[in-house]
Amino acid sequence: MKRIGMLTSGGDCQALNAAMRGVVKTLAHSGEAVEIYGFLDGYKGLIYGNFQMLTGKDFSGILTKGGTILGSSRTPFKTIQEPDENGLDKVDAMKQNYFKLRLDVLVVLGGNGSHKTANLLREEGLNIVTLPKTIDNDLWGTDMTFGFQSAVDIATECIDCIHTTAASHGRVFIVEVMGHKVGWLTLNAGMAGGADIILLPEIPYDIKKVVQKIEEREKNGSKFTIIAVAEGAISKETAKLSKKEQKKKAAESKYPSVSYEVADEIFKRTGREVRVTVPGHTQRGGSPCPYDRVFASRLGAEAGKLILKGEYGFMVGYRNREIVKVPLDEVAGKLKYLDPKSTIIEEAKLLGISFGD
Ligand code: F6P
């Protein structure tokens, strides 16, 4: 008999349900008796002992369902070791609930912050297996996270729609893509949607270069320009500031996000009409794409295998087209940035895409 705790933590994404289903189906298929404790709303459920007993039936029919049947919440790592408003020691509470329920393992589906907490719990003596979720694809130790491809599809569809209206009106259009501090999502959606300019956090932009590209396109007969801007994109000037100064600048900015600043700069320099579209959380919503359904199911199956073998302290990841197990202490606390010198950037440049650098 295996007693398994499970939680989904942080911003949700597509295929969380598919991944959990993968774990549970694998265990059920092995013939091992299991008890599943589903903690509600991420680590909060583990802290406050909020859980539901789940059976195989609860995981049936959820392969294609977006969101998470367990609910999720952000429980920031930077305050996890501070007591809550009633003085409760959160880490101790999680340990107590884990041991009180006599769990064999806690399965955590999460992104960066969630992995830091998962690793802390491992250090505290809990058996942990994790699965890499996030539309940002910024988790260290895995080439791919589930949710990413589905979000690429949605952001691409948004750029596709903008393309037709941009062409009709001869305007400059900006599509702001999520991704937090990294540019994976914007780069992939931008390339898939045929963006002319792509602005990424890893390649600070020079607005003069952005304007130059728009003007070049016009000279060559293209009346419109599509710019995919990552929500974390920064200008060369901003990149020179310290992190603290950057935060202050963002807090004092009159623009709701970087895209509006880029739009305003283009307007001031060229007088051209610029429109901004922000698909926002739609990028995390809806049904997972077929790639994510398969990928998350595979990761879930491999997590199930680790649990059956009693191998704990790992994230199930994907490297060089193979599913691998990565020690949690290697994953926790590192962001996987895009390398500005990577071949995909070089290839995009060969295609004529400008990064404003
Ligand atoms: O990490 C996933 C993500 O969607 C990021 O791309 C984005 O910056 C952030 O979450 C938004 O967070 P929230 O849902 O808390 O507004």
Image (spheres, grey):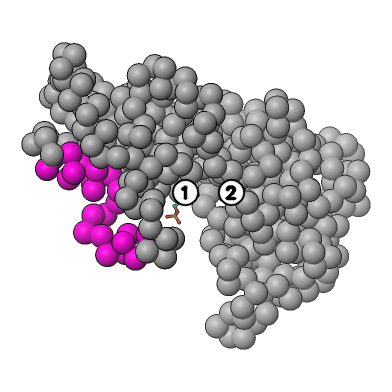
Q: Is mark 1 within 8 Å of ligand 1?
A: no
- Mark sitting earlier along the chain (2/1): 1
Query: Main SS of the magenta segment?
Result: helix
User: Which label is found at residue 234?
Assistant: none
Q: Residue 154 lies in magenta, yes or no?
A: no
Q: Residue furthest bottom?
A: 87
Which residue is found at the position 57% from the left and 33% from the top? 64
Q: Residue furthest left?
A: 271
User: Disc 2 versus disc 1: distance between alpha carbons?
Assistant: 9 Å
Q: Which residues are magenta?
A: 246-268
Q: For the residue carrying disc 2, how many other residues have a C-alpha within 10 Å: few (<14), some (14-19), or many (20+)?
A: some
Q: Residue furthest front?
A: 240
Does residue 209 appear anywhere in the picture? yes
- Judged from the image, the secondary structure of the residue bearing numbered disc 1 is loop
Residue matched to label 2: 335
Q: Is residue 39 left or right of residue 126?
A: left
Picture coordinates of residue 35, whole percent (x, y): 81, 54
Specify the amino acid type for callout 1: Lys
Specify the amino acid type for callout 2: Leu
Which residue is found at the position 34% from the left and 27% from the top? 354
Above or below 157: residue 264? below
- Judged from the image, the secondary structure of the residue bearing numbered disc 2 is loop
**Nearest to the observer: residue 342 or residue 223:** 342
Which residue is found at the position 21% from the left and 20% from the top? 217
Above or below 265: residue 222? above
Instruction: Give the quarter of the image for residue 42.
Output: bottom right
User: Which label is found at residue 181?
Assistant: 1
Q: Are marks 2 and 1 in contact (CB under 8 Å)?
A: yes
**Nearest to the observer: residue 93 or residue 170:** 170
Q: For the residue carrying disc 1, how many other residues have a C-alpha within 10 Å: few (<14), some (14-19), or many (20+)?
A: some
Above or below 65: residue 197? above
**Nearest to the observer: residue 331 or residue 146:** 331
